[in-house]
Amino acid sequence: MTAQVWIDQTRDMLLSGYVEELDLVIAPAVTDATSTTVSVQGLAGGISRGTVIEIGSELMYVTAKTGDTQVSVIRGYGGSTASATGHAVDSIVRVSPKFPTHRIIQSINDELADLSTPSSGLFQMLTTSFTYNGGVDGYNLDTGSNVVNSVYSVTYADIGSEASEPEVMSWRLKRNRDTSSFSSGLALILYTAAWPGQKVTVSYKSPLTPITDGTTNRSATGLETTAYDLPPLGAALALMTTAPIRREFLDAEGTSRMAEEVPPGAISASMRDLRFRRDQRVQAEAARLAAMYPQMWQRNSANRPSSNWSGFRA
C-alpha cells in the first residue's frame, strides 16, 4: 500500500469522524502548474471567494467563482507547491481543510526522522559492497544518497561451496574523508584480510527514508511492517500542537458550550493518551529491531591493540 493510507489515518485521528466538505474536478483537467482556472462539479456550497481549497497536496486560494462550476484560484497557496503535472478529472477537491495534506506529509516525514534517532532506536538495515584488493586497506563506502548511522557488520565471500560469509573481524569507519580519495566522504578501513578479488558486503544502519507524496510505497521508507501504525500517530501528535482535533475546534462549539466542553488544557489532555500509545509502540518496535540485530561489540575491533591483531585470521 502507498503512504496515502498514512495520510488518511492521520487526518481521521485529527478530525475525529468529522467529514470535510468535498467536491470533484471535472473536465477540462488542470494540466500544469500555472493554470488558474479549476472546473468543479458544484457539489460543495462552501466554495466562494476567499475560500481555500485543496487538490492532492496543493492548496489554492479562490479569487472568484463563476456559476457553480468555474473557480479562479491562486496556485500553490499557504506553503504548498503547485503541481507540475496538474490535477486529473475526478480528483477530490477538499474545501477549507483544517489539516492540509502537505502539512500531514511533512509531519509524517518529521516522525520518520524522529523514529530514526538513537533515543527512539528505529532504523533500516541496508547493504553495500566492494571487491577486496589485498594491496588496499581503505575503501570508499559508497551508499548513494543513504546516510550511514553506523556499520553493523562486514563480511566477505569465501572460496568454495560452503559460502559461510566470514566476518572481517577488525575494521573502522572514518567520516569526513578527503573526497578526492573517498568520493562519499566515508572510508572503511580493514585491519584484517578478506579473499582477494571477492566481494565484501557491508551492512549498515540508516535513517528511515521520507515519503514524497501519497503515491510513495510505505515499504520504500524502510520501516518494518509491524511499525506501520507509528507515522500517523506521531504526525497527529505534531499537528495537534498547532491545531486542535475536531472535537475541540472552537468554531465547532456554540459560545455557551465553549467554557465547559473545551476548557483550558483540553488539547493537552487529548494528546496524553495518544502520546502514551505512541511511546509504548516505539519502545516495542525498537526492542524488536534490537532482537533482530543484536549489538556485538567485537564487530568493530579497530581500537584493539595492534599486538592482538595477529591472533585474528580472515
Image (spheres, helix red, strand yellow):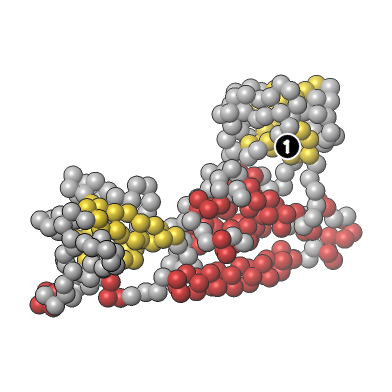
Extreme residue toward the front, this view:
161
Q: Amino acid at mark 1?
A: Ile
Q: Give above or below for 43 relative to 226.
A: above
Tell whether 312 sits left or right of 34: left
Q: Is residue 157 visible?
A: yes
User: Which residue is located at x 50 percent, y 50 percent?
Assistant: 220
Which of the pair 45/23 is nearer the observer? 23
Which of the pair 192/31 is nearer the observer? 192
Q: Is residue 244 visible?
A: no
Tell whether 148 sits left or right of 135: right
User: Helix, strand, or loop for circle 1?
Assistant: strand
Q: Give above or below for 247 relative to 295.
A: above
Where residue 40 appears, x then y in whole percent?
Answer: 77, 28
User: Which residue is located at x 29 percent, y 58 percent?
Assistant: 201
Where residue 53 appears, x then y in whole percent?
Answer: 72, 36
Tell whether 268 sits left or right of 145: right
Where residue 162 appears, x then y in whole percent?
Answer: 28, 66
Where residue 274 appears, x then y in whole percent?
Answer: 67, 67
Asked which quadrant contains residue 312, the reply is bottom left
Which of the pair 109/218 is nearer the observer? 218
Q: Quadrant of the C terminus?
A: bottom left
User: Which residue is located at x 63 percent, y 36 percent?
Assistant: 58
Categorize mark 1 by other alpha carbons within 10 Å: few (<14), some (14-19), many (20+).
some
Q: Which residue is mark 1?
A: 92
User: Which residue is located at x 59 percent, y 60 percent?
Assistant: 228
